[in-house]
Image (spheres, rainbow, N blue to C red):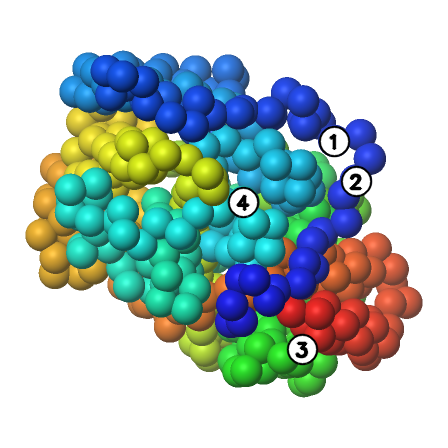
Amino acid sequence: MSAPQNRRVAALALVAGLGLSLAACSTKSDNSSDASGKVTITVDCQPVGAQQELLRDWNADVAEFQKLHPNITIKSVSVGEQCNNPPDFTARLQGGTVTDVFYGYMTDLDQVLDSGQAMEITEYVTKDTIPTWDSLDAGAKAAFSDGGKVYGVPTKNYSMGLVYNKNLFQQAGLDPKNPPKTWAEVRTAAKRIAALGNGIAGYSDYSAANTGGWHFTAELYSQGGRLVSEDGKKADFNNPMGRQVLQNLKDMRYGDDSMGAKQLLQWPDLLTNAAAGKVGMFIGAPDATTAIVTQFQGKYQDWAMGPMPGQDGPAKATLGGGEGYFVKKGLSPEQVRAGLMWLAYEKLTPGKGQFDYVRAKPENQPVGLPQPQLFTVGSDAYRQDLDLRKANANVNVEDFAAFENNPVPVRFEPPNAQAIYAVLDSAMSAVLTDPNANVDALLKTAEDKVNGLLATR
């Protein structure tokens, strides 16, 4: 990547009528510590009110952290169920209204650095602020670094596979313990599930709000392709592998009528349908089941997961990604350290925060899912987390055995991914809404637009 000062912004186009006003997000920090050494920091991604258990746990963690560190005050901000809706996030970046410690996807590094909002935190990331730092996965840390400098802290990572509804598999005469392993098998299974009627989609996919491009990428990786060239300068999906991705979807949508009539689905749309028992299969990460249950009133026992399908055999690769937090430029050293200590407590310590399985188990939050895998295999933190996860499992780990026991090589998202995903949404939506869509033309148009984006970097 080029140095931050030489970057040019390739930001997503903002939409009118954003659900979250910039004024409501404005969170100016105190930017100093008082004479007593007390500091205040603002942190986003607090669970929304509808997520009652998650919100209660967050507030309890804030209270406990502040008891341990009485000189630090955490002010929590909620920015919606997704934490990062790309247009909203871009608006906050460009408006300078991000919190002191702000959430972002791994794919957001470029636009965060372009915006000038993030602080380099290399010197602050130590065992004193984040005791498990040396145990964190190197690839996850690299996604928040540029030119050897650290700008963010990873707090979750994932890889994608085939999420499927066991009940619908059984009703359709399919074996819930033997999920499809190829896209041809997905197509066959989808037809049988869709034949159940009642508005059930055998297979469902995204095609809006950047999620379509995200899934196009995952499915392209399964074919062995890549989104951009190795040097990052050119689009690399207008080829037989990219063509196969779109053709698979078009065939299922119009050849088989196995994807349902309602399209242009975004993240909450698909998961709402899934929770209602109207989706047989979709591509997702293990925590998709968490969202189905905690946000959309589904049931854990309905869901299982297999590896990403390949075209004619095992997938060549699967998409990996994740999330983390950046620190807003201009904070005092005391505020930076306080923010990192909070992230360490809430996100990166076995037995605490997101890894507090003892607390999660009676609340029916999932324990035992093969995610996140933030810690390097074999490290002390990894072993401690694995022992706690197994001891407190409350989901049937066998439902995820096919996914966990058949690992697929992980390929992370490319730089500037969100802007590229926005372009590819158009190709995805076209093949799912137009029976006459020309796959070759769609890929060529998307290629030209993505090359234009990459040329401005």
Mark 4 = which residue?
117
Residue 8: give x, y in percent of width and height. 67, 63
Q: CA distance from mark 4 to mark 3?
A: 28 Å
Could you say which disc has been placed on residue 401 in the image? none
Local secondary structure at mark 1: loop
Residue 200: give x, y in percent of width and height. 66, 42
Mark 1 = which residue?
18
> Is 238 placed left or right of 376 in the picture?
right
Q: Residues within 10 Å of mark 1 (few under 14, many from 20)?
A: few
Q: Residues within 10 Å of mark 4 (few under 14, many from 20)?
A: many
Among the two numbered marks 4 and 1 on one chain, the one whose residue lies closer to the N terminus: 1
> Is 114 placed left or right of 32 in the picture?
right
Among the two numbered marks 4 and 3 on one chain, the one whose residue lies closer to the N terminus: 4
Mark 2 = which residue?
15
Give, as a three-letter code, the residue at label 2: Val
Q: Is 217 or 273 nearer to us in this picture?
A: 217
